[in-house]
Amino acid sequence: GQNIDQPTEMTATEGAIVQINCTYQTSGFNGLFWYQQHAGEAPTFLSYNVLDGLEEKGRFSSFLSRSKGYSYLLLKELQMKDSASYLCAVRDSNYQLIWGAGTKLIIKP
Amino acid sequence: ETGVTQTPRHLVMGMTNKKSLKCEQHLGHNAMYWYKQSAKKPLELMFVYSLEERVENNSVPSRFSPECPNSSHLFLHLHTLQPEDSALYLCASSQAMGSGHYEQYFGPGTRLTVT
């Protein structure tokens, strides 16, 4: 079966750095997406990785290792508004998105 | 209107009712999706319309019926639902599936409660 694993919940301090991990086992691989979802709102696209390595976009970076079936989302200089759920999704060989259950990130002052 | 819109935002219905959820995208995309989101569970893909062709998840009960009259509009018709169908129903759109980097854009969702 296909599976995406992420921690259920993480807590971090304002101004700090946090890394949210995602491991996957899917039928084929055609890219990995990270989305942010604030409570009661729609998921919004954060990043996309299809080749190994690090993609940086402002305070957010995403890393991919296809051989290890592993990705992480790195959030720097945390702000209170970063409190949200972070969803990892992998596009499989049929170009369907397989979703993780999401990681709820709590930022404390 | 911009992006992806969904109506209604909240819906309470009895198990014998019939209702419909509506989604409209203003992004010029040619693929649209219905997802079910339950607490602490992964997003469940229910239906996909891509280039006006329906791709269906076989595990979706027949009490959910999608309709896609054109590339901008998507409906989810509901009838004789069960309490376990209570969830957030999200609509999304994207360019058609393929090898490109095509992220999905989501609507705000309809919070459905079945009593």
Image: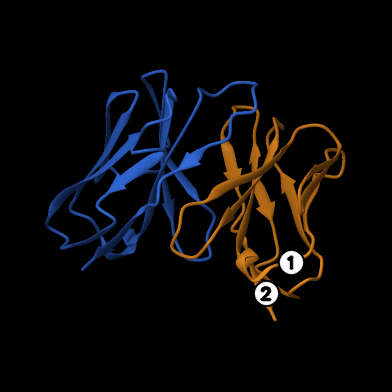
Reading the image, the residue beneath label 2 is A107
x 42%, y 38%: residue: B3
Reading the image, the residue beneath label 1 is A78
Most foreground residue, B25 or A69: B25
x 53%, y 62%: residue: A38
x 43%, y 63%: residue: A40
- The answer to whether A7 appears left or right of A71 in the picture is left
User: Hey, what amino acid is under mark 2?
Assistant: Ile
User: Hey, what amino acid is under mark 1?
Assistant: Leu
Q: Is residue A98 above or below residue A16?
A: above
Q: Position of residue B111 (x, y in %)?
A: 32, 60
Most foreground residue, B63 or B107: B107
Shown in orange, the chain is A
Look at the image and give the colour of chain B. blue
Mark 1 / mark 2, whichever is N-terminal = 1
Q: Quadrant of the N terminus of chain A?
A: top right
